[in-house]
Image (cartoon, rainbow, N blue to C red):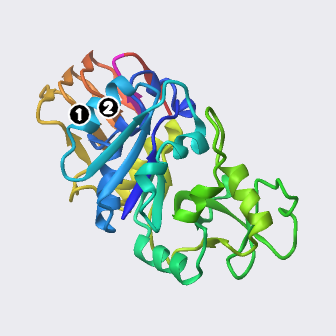
């Protein structure tokens, strides 16, 4: 089975961090986000992954080319093409796949993808959106039988008493039939208008799958949520990364002075140097940061270019 990871975006909600790295390379306890997504997909039988690139692709593509545990097909977008235009570039890559998965590059999840795929097959859906209840973005209107009838209230169904409004998890399942609905045009376009067209013309062929709990799901598309994901991993243990159980994670190349104190949770990246009477609490320190003094760093993200207080 194949999957697509949308990875071309600018990550504007994550600035100034995305001035340095594209979202797929964001370190999560010193592991690039893209690695965690690929591990997740591989767990559910995905053997080939297409990844579109645009923003800071000069950093992302060399990293992707070094990955050997899964087959990766990369497209380069000279101009941003959007979710629709980006997907269109993979038409040949996907042409022999009966179904395929789409996953964005800013989601951490333990949702059971096998069960979602079986739901998709059983209902002969063109599209299955995996749903979560996340009030800030509960914009998908769904009937009690799972049929999706609106997205972002474009069709005026949000206030319909017969619908429940949930959020798309940014993990979806598509039949190959979907590719025929994509307009054969060059340039930028988004995928939601295509989905809405299918909803209007093929009722009941677009459904939402609500996964059984417990599961973990987090959109790390904001600086606050990216920081909170580390709290989930290191303090709450609600998302496990490579068996990490400790609250303080320091890269082997980091140099930490004897007088430096840690509290709560903390992560230090490659070639970090911390000296003096520093106190680091609930903070993330990216690669190559050098810090000396009596400062207290609390609820912060430090890079070589900026310090973000949360």
Residue drawn 32% across the image and 55% down it: 48
Residue drawn 54% across the image and 84% down it: 122
Bounds of the magenta span?
299-304
Whether residue 182 sits left or right of residue 259 in the image: it is right
Residue 45: give x, y in percent of width and height: 31, 68
Q: Is residue 196 visible?
A: yes
Residue drawn 19% across the image and 52% down it: 69
How crowded pointer 1 is (Cα within 10 Å; few <14, some 14-19, many 20+) is rated as some
Q: Is residue 175 visible?
A: no
Which residue is nearer to you in this view: 31 or 130? Answer: 130
Q: Which residue is mark 2?
A: 61
For the residues carrying marks 2 and 1, which lies nearer the camera in this image? 2
Q: CA distance from mark 2 to mark 1?
A: 37 Å
Magenta stretch: includes residue 302: yes
Residue drawn 61% across the image and 59% down it: 168
Residue 191: give x, y in percent of width and height: 64, 48
Q: Which residue is mark 1?
A: 261
The vertical placement of 101 against 92, above or below, is below
Whether residue 165 sits left or right of residue 131 in the image: it is right
How crowded pointer 2 is (Cα within 10 Å; few <14, some 14-19, many 20+) is rated as some
Which residue is nearer to you in this view: 210 or 53? Answer: 53
């Amino acid at each position: 089975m194949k999957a697509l990871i949308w990875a071309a975006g600018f990550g504007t909600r994550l600035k100034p961090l995305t001035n340095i790295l594209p979202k797929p390379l964001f370190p999560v306890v010193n592991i690039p986000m893209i690695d965690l997504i690929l591990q997740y997909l591989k767990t559910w039988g995905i053997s080939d992954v297409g990844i579109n690139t645009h923003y800071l692709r000069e950093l992302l593509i060399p990293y992707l080319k070094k990955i050997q545990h899964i087959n990766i097909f990369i497209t380069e977008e000279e101009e941003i093409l959007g979710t629709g235009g980006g997907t269109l570039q993979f038409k040949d890559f996907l042409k022999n796949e009966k179904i395929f998965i789409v996953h964005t590059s800013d989601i951490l999840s333990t949702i059971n993808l096998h069960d979602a795929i079986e739901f998709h097959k059983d209902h002969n859906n063109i599209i299955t959106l995996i749903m979560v209840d996340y009030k800030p973005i509960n914009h998908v209107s769904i009937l009690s039988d799972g049929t999706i009838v609106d997205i972002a209230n474009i069709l005026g169904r949000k206030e319909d008493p017969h619908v429940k409004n949930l959020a798309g998890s940014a993990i979806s399942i598509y039949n190959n039939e979907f590719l025929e609905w994509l307009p054969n045009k060059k340039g930028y376009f988004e995928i939601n208008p295509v989905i809405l067209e299918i909803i209007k013309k093929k009722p009941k062929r677009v459904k939402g799958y609500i996964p059984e709990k417990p599961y973990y799901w987090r959109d790390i598309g904001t600086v606050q949520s990216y920081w909170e994901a580390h709290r989930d991993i290191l303090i709450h243990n609600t998302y496990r990364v490579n068996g990490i159980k400790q609250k303080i994670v320091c890269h082997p190349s980091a140099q930490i002075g004897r007088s430096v104190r840690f509290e709560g949770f903390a992560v230090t990246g490659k070639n970090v140097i911390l000296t003096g009477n520093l106190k680091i609490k609930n903070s993330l320190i990216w690669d190559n940061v050098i810090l000396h003094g009596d400062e207290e760093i609390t609820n912060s993200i430090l890079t070589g270019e900026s310090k973000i207080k949360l």
